[in-house]
Amino acid sequence: MARALQALIPHTPITGIPSFRLLRQLPSPAFSPIPNRKSNVAPCVWELHSVYRIRCIKASAKSLEGNGDGEEEKPLPVVVTSNWTKTLANVASDNFLPLALICGVLLGLANPGPGCLADKLYVSKISTFGIFVISGLTLRSDEIGAATEAWPVGLFGLASILFFTPLFSKIILMLKLQPQEFVTGLAIFCCMPTTLSSGVALTRLAGGNSALALAMTLISNLLGILIIPYSISKFIAAGVGVAIPTEQLLRSLVLTLLVPLILGKVARELSKGIADFADGNRKLLAVISAIFLSSAPWIQVSRSRSLLLMVKPEIFLVAVIMGVLLHFALFSFNALLIPSLSLITGGSKSPFAKKENTSALLLVASQKTLPVMVAVVEQLGGALGASGLLVLPCVAAHLNQIIIDSFIVSLWKQKEGSFENAKIA
């Protein structure tokens, strides 16, 4: 029977690869698919398999080397991802937050309807609530200890937010611009506490001391309710009585900042599964937090679009540049004081010498909050100018500071990644 099968199989002369021809003469059971060692069918089947493999190898070699007449055959189509798409994806991933913020601004300008609807549905408060729930979920107990150890940094941050940076309002009031409400609005903006959510979110993205950022955010906003009336009366209003809705602001801050933070932290401590999920998906949670944060410019621009269209573009551009320069001035003020403070408080062992502390300080102490400013302006009742014109340049300043700092964080991360790669190499 074996001879009959061998006669039916077409044999092609094979040269150049003798090892396969020798294998069919080996009676080893390792090559036999049939348990019966005495059968002669196994070598025959192995020969058929070897011939098939050799033909495939020779066909592949021929397709690579050419057909012998000097003409190369066309290779099989291969799907290759182009370098530019990969680079574009990497850039989008590294700069997700600033891109999301810019998209929110453009969306609000193009179609304000959804943004105004989102404002009526309290999406901004829900987003802030979500950001602080995520902060509580990802807040490790050792980070709280690190924040306690960095109390000198936090103390200076609070002093900078509530006492030092409001002094810049005196410089802003020296500028002349029509309408004058633009200048007055930016001066009021200087007297505000730090942002409610973006400083914490950016600190977490930068790998900074997020617990320290949380502490400075909560304390500065709670104390700011008591200090803001004094700051505005002293530096801006020149004796004009300013009434601040203290009880309403305090309740709002507790509900949107403190409660979600506690809920997230309690959930983390009570469930090991939640803690493991938060630790294993920190990048995903950072993206969700960035999406929540991008809803703020979308809603603010949608609300202010009609006022934006009423102002001359060149005047509004000047106000935008003023807001950008203000943020750079605040950022530079805090950055220039860090080396001196580090030297005074212990040099290399100082809490000001640790990068995670200084990044939290720079990001939180250099930003000002818009929602509290809007609440304050509404209570002024037009004493310092039209409310809409007072708020409008501050909307741009609020967006600019977040976009600028998000790019700074991206640069920090890229620089840190390059350093780590060089260190590994």
Image (tube, grey):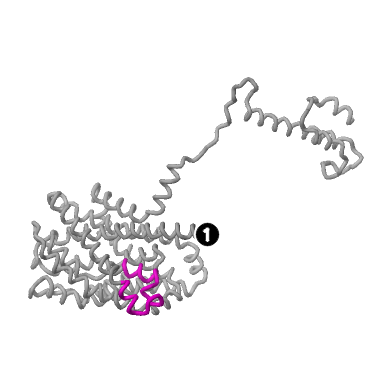
Horizontal side of 52 relative to 412 (left or right) equals right
Is the magenta region chiefly helix, strand or loop?
A: helix
Picture layout, residue 180 above or below residue 110: below
Name the amino acid type tagged 1.
Answer: Ile
Picture layout, residue 249 above or below residue 417: below
Horizontal side of 152 relative to 374 (left or right) equals right
Picture layout, residue 37 above or below residue 231: above
Quick one: 400 or 83, which is closer to the camera?
Answer: 83
Quadrant location of the N terminus?
top right
Q: Residue at x 74, y 32 (%)?
A: 54
Residue 423 place in picture, x, y as percent? 50, 60
Looking at the image, the residue that sits furthest to the top is 69
Q: Residue at x 28, y 49 (%)?
A: 107
Residue 312 place in picture, x, y as percent? 12, 49
Quick one: 375 or 190, which is closer to the camera?
Answer: 190
Residue 100 place in picture, x, y as percent? 34, 53
Q: Residue at x 66, y 31 (%)?
A: 61
Quick one: 101 or 1, which is closer to the camera?
Answer: 101
Helix, strand or loop at mark 1: helix
Image-quadrant location for residue 35: top right
The magenta-colored residue range is 338-363
Task: Tell me the residue that label 1 is attached to.
Answer: 424
115 magenta-colored: no
Classed neighbour count for the residue bearing mark 1: other residues with Cα under 10 Å, few (<14), some (14–19), many (≥20) = few
